[in-house]
Amino acid sequence: MTSDNTKDAKNQVLNTCQDMESAKLVIGSSGNASFRVEGTDHVAITPSSVDYSCMSAEDVLIINMEGEVVEGDRNPSIEHPLHLAVYTARPDVNAIVHTHCIYASAMAVLRQPLPPIVDEFVIRLGGQVEVAEYGQPGSEELAKNVIEALGERNAVFLANHGALCCGPTMDVALYNALLLERVAHIYLLASAAAGGKKQLTTIPPDAIETQAQMFELMKRMKKR
Ligand SMILES: [Zn+2]
């Protein structure tokens, strides 16, 4: 029988996919989201190839940490090895949002890390956002490269692909994805306005340090 926690996890994934589409972070069935089912070692994850506009909570899959389907009739997202690798490496992460949004993807194509150029960035994302080396979608290589580049932060670019954001709750993971897209947009606009002639200035080192401490504090406070 489906537990309340499983039902809640499925609804969180569904609502987030619809929010991702409304915010133009993805189109059609691209990108994906997942959420740890509280009190279990299961994960609720987007099905493969189902448009978000017609997805229902029953379409969301429940898988175990080996990637086997525990509940649901569809196939899990091709990127489930990536999601499971992040959950294994990061016990503080309960939610993951993977997007193909325009400005973050442009950074991923440029293979350009995103430095802390505005306030709030380090508090939410943990520091400069790095670029994971290329790996084919769904591959163990991609999962390994993402874990390496993500480190203890809450966002990473996937070379020539898109971005992945995470957090202790689904709301935080989605917020982080929106923030990353916004700051990537600002970075690209400012770089273009400078004609590529000027290195953009980050927030000062002491502000980076203070905000990094707040990030660590928030990480500890938001544990389940
Ligand atoms: Zn993708």
Image (tube, grey):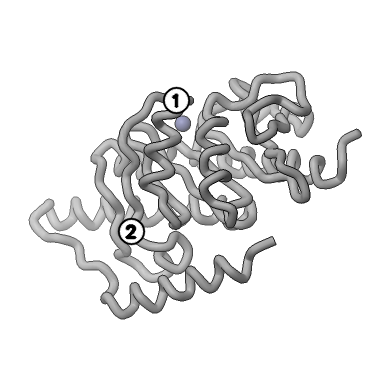
Residue 67, position in %: x, y? Answer: 63, 28
- Number of numbered callouts drawn: 2
Residue under the image location 41 percent in, 41 percent down? 146
Q: Considering depth in this image, is 19 or 153 the residue closer to the camera?
A: 153
Name the residue that disc number 2 marks. 128
Q: Is residue 181 visible?
A: no
- The part of the image, by quadrant, that contains residue 61 is top right
Q: Which of marks 1 and 2 is in front?
A: 1
Quadrant of residue 42 within the rendered picture: top right
Q: Distance between the residues labelled 1 and 2?
A: 25 Å
Quadrant placement of the C terminus = bottom right
Which label belongs to residue 139? 1
Is residue 9 something one can see in this rendering?
Answer: yes
Q: What residue type is labelled 1?
A: Ser
Measured as percent of width and height from the top left, residue 110 is found at: 24, 40
Q: What residue is drawn where x is 62% and y is 40%?
A: 34
Q: Quadrant of residue 127?
A: bottom left
